[in-house]
Image (cartoon, helix red, strand yellow):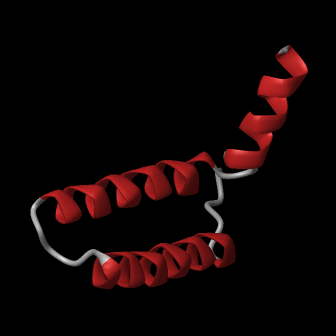
Amino acid sequence: MRAFLRFWYDFVVGDDWTIAVAVVALLGGAALLVELGAGAWWWMTVSVVVTLGWSVWRGAHPRTRD
């Protein structure tokens, strides 16, 4: 059971937990928009582009620690 859970953790979270949290938050936002009767396609489109850009920027500009 432990190996099964470890696999799913590695599969979902991977190397960057912040992207996993962002995906969960974005899906929650889309669900909220659907509940309110609004279309969520535009939310997910913009969110994916912004999240991808943020991830690439973070990868290209790593923090340096002195």
| Residue in the image at 67% along x and 71% along y | 59
- Which quarter of the rendered picture does the N terminus lie within? top right
Image vertical order of residue 61 relative to residue 6, above or below: below
Image vertical order of residue 34 relative to residue 54, above or below: above
Relative side of 62 to 52, left or right: right
Relative side of 31 to 15, left or right: left
Quadrant in the picture for residue 5: top right
**Residue at the outermost right position:** 3
The x, y position of residue 4, in whole percent, is: 85, 26
> 11 or 17: nearer the eye?
11
Quadrant in the picture for residue 36: bottom left
Relative side of 37 to 12, left or right: left
The x, y position of residue 53, in whole percent, is: 52, 82
> 16 or 57: nearer the eye?
16
Image vertical order of residue 12 relative to residue 56, above or below: above
> 47 or 15: nearer the eye?
47
**Residue at the outermost left position:** 36
| Residue in the image at 45% along x and 56% along y | 22
| Residue in the image at 28% along x and 57% along y | 31
The x, y position of residue 25, in whole percent, is: 37, 52
